[in-house]
Amino acid sequence: VRQYAQGWFTAFPDMSVKQTNRVVSDDAVAAEVQFTGTNTGPMMMAGKEIPPTGKSVVGKGTYFARVKDGKVVEFNSYPDIAGMMMQLGFMPQM
């Protein structure tokens, strides 16, 4: 989880994350978030480093973690990559 977050904060050092929804059970947590940031650092995509664009993005994502004995044992992330790529100019607007 730490390495995943570090990659995002490298690409978007000013990133702000706001939780918009959360569901918690005994062994799992799901969260929906909205994030904003400016791409001023390199970003890794499909194993390739992409140089910064200087563009700002507003996006959403959903994250799921399974917890055992107080530790995250499974983590899945579902950020809106297509929306972010459109805002950064890597994909045509739909």
Image (cartoon, rainbow, N blue to C red):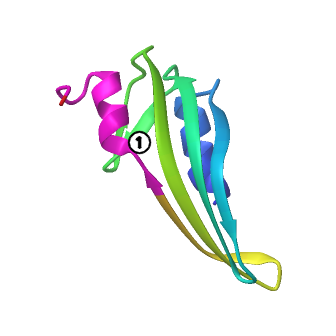
Q: Nearer the viewer, residue 8 or 44?
A: 8
On screen, residue 29 above or below 21: below
Q: Position of residue 30 (x, y in %)?
A: 61, 65
Q: Which residues are magenta?
A: 78-93
Q: Secondary structure at mark 1?
A: strand
**Left or right of residue 33, residue 45 in this image:** left
Q: Quadrant of residue 53?
A: top left
Residue 84 is one of the magenta-drawn residues: yes
> Image point 82% across, 85% down: which residue?
69
Q: Quadrant of the N terminus?
A: bottom right
> Image point 18% across, 31% down: which residue?
94
Residue position marked by numbered label 1 in the rendering:
44
**Left or right of residue 26, residue 17 in this image:** left
Q: Position of residue 52 (x, y in %)?
A: 43, 21
**Left or right of residue 89, residue 64 in this image:** right
Q: Position of residue 87 (x, y in %)?
A: 34, 24
Q: Position of residue 19 (x, y in %)?
A: 66, 45
**Left or right of residue 82, residue 51 in this image:** right
On screen, residue 47 above or below 86: below
> Image point 56% across, 38% down: which residue?
34
Q: Residue furthest top?
A: 54
Amino acid type of the residue tagged 1 in the rendering: Met
Mark 1 surroundings within 10 Å by alpha-carbon count, few (fewer than 14), some (14 through 19), many (20 or more): few
Residue 73 is one of the magenta-drawn residues: no
Q: Nearer the viewer, residue 53 or 27?
A: 27
Q: Residue furthest right?
A: 70
> Image point 31% across, 50% down: which residue?
46
Q: Quadrant of residue 67?
A: bottom right
Circle count: 1
On screen, residue 27 above or below 78: below
